[in-house]
Amino acid sequence: MSADEDVLAVIDALYEAAMDEAQWPNTLQRLTDLTGSQAATFWVLDGSDQPRLPLFTAINFDPGFIAEYLDHMAPADPTVQYLVRHPHASIVHDGLVISERDKDRHAYYDWHHRFTDARFRMIGRITPAPSVQAGVALHRGRTVGRYEPADIERFVLLQRHLERALAMGFRLGTLGTLQQCTNELLDRNTAAILLVSEHGRVVYANRRAAALHEQRDGLALVDGITLGNRDDQEKLQSLIARAASDITKHDAGGAMQAGRPSGKRPYAILVSPVSRRYSAFAALAPAACIMITDPEERSAPSLDRLQAVLGLTGAEARLAALLAAGDDLRGAARELGITYGTARTRLAAIFQKTDTNRQADLVRLLLGVVAQEWGRV
């Protein structure tokens, strides 16, 4: 393999490692071979308070030496201290950090040389977030010698690709973390939450939605959502189409109930539009969010919370709780032992206090308050 092919192979390996952290040992080995080094590390440095290395991959170092370095000696390493003090230098080498004479008198290097012959370092790194750095360190021993200006100049080409690869890796890792966090929060919600495409295909379903599907009580999830009653199904499809048609419309989406073969109280279903400003490469492009609540399996939301958050009286909070649990106004009136007219009067007061004017908007607001409450459980 020619020298140019060797460089291209290392560049390819950098991008592969950015996509898959398990590839870093192979990439580090390629880097050491190309640069005439004896050892290498890939690391992430958190220098916010006490410098620490939460991610550290090494090749050609004794594992015991690496363990003691990470557990005790890294904060005392002059190179780590330099990186923390100079977060924007993309390439760092020994000549910037410490003289050879000072190495011989430094306590860290006294410890260091008891374990390894590695004495010289050259580092390429990025700072993807405040107080967070990531990079690669190449190491040479005394017999090979320091990294000379010509070595550093050749490393500049690789550093450009290293920067792009690490930036890509952090971006993908951040997106993955956000996705995991979002999924965990949605799974903690006791409502069934689904994201559907403009054609009604399910692109995401939380844990509760999957549980409702398994109950087989008038709701099934395959590619889309299928309700047991034909009229309910047509109404749901109409709400999805309305939500997907124009997210700027005031009445986009809406609320409904869906009957169940078991005879249990009907599901309460809320359909809301979702922004569709997605990348052309997005694998998921939801157009609507569907929230399904089962009044049989939920206790009423905290009346105290409804009163505190929405400024409702006790009587208004009790009515609002029943509406949030899926009851219609007549059913809620019967449950509370009041007339339908009294329920309408209280509902009008709730509308005024919550700055809503339709029951669907109120239910959407109530479910948001309830979701916050359940999310803390």
Image: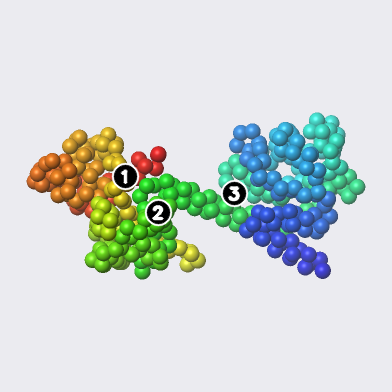
Query: Picture coordinates of residue 336 (x, y %)?
Result: 16, 41
**Residue 77's quadrant in the figure?**
top right
Relative to 167, say whether 104 is above or below.
above
* C-alpha separation, residue under disc 1 versus residue under disc 3: 44 Å
Tag 1: residue type? Arg
Q: Earlier in the sequence, mark 1 or mark 3?
A: 3
Relative to 195, say whether 58 is above or below.
above
* Colouring of the image: rainbow
Q: Is residue 252 visible?
A: yes
* C-alpha separation, residue under disc 2 versus residue under disc 1: 14 Å
32 or 186: nearer the eye? 186
Residue at disc 1, secondary structure: loop
Residue at disc 3, secondary structure: strand
**Residue 202's quadrant in the figure?**
bottom left
Question: In the rendered image, which residue does mark 2 sit on?
Answer: 211
Tag 2: residue type? Ala
Count neighbours of disc 2 (C-alpha within 10 A) and say few if under 14, some if 14 to 19, many if 20 or more. Answer: few
Residue at disc 2, secondary structure: helix
Question: In the rendered image, which residue does mark 1 sit on?
Answer: 298
251 or 96: nearer the eye? 251
Query: Picture coordinates of residue 29 (x, y %)?
Result: 78, 55
Relative to 101, say whether 181 is above or below.
below
On residue 221, the disc is none
**Residue 108's quadrant in the figure?**
top right
Query: Picture coordinates of residue 304 (x, y %)?
Result: 27, 34
* C-alpha separation, residue under disc 3 versus residue under disc 2: 40 Å
Q: Earlier in the sequence, mark 2 or mark 1?
A: 2
| Residue positioned 84% across, 33% down in the render | 110
Circles 3, 2 touching at the beta carbon (< 8 Å) = no
Q: Is residue 345 visible?
A: no
Query: Picture coordinates of residue 352 (x, y %)?
Result: 17, 44
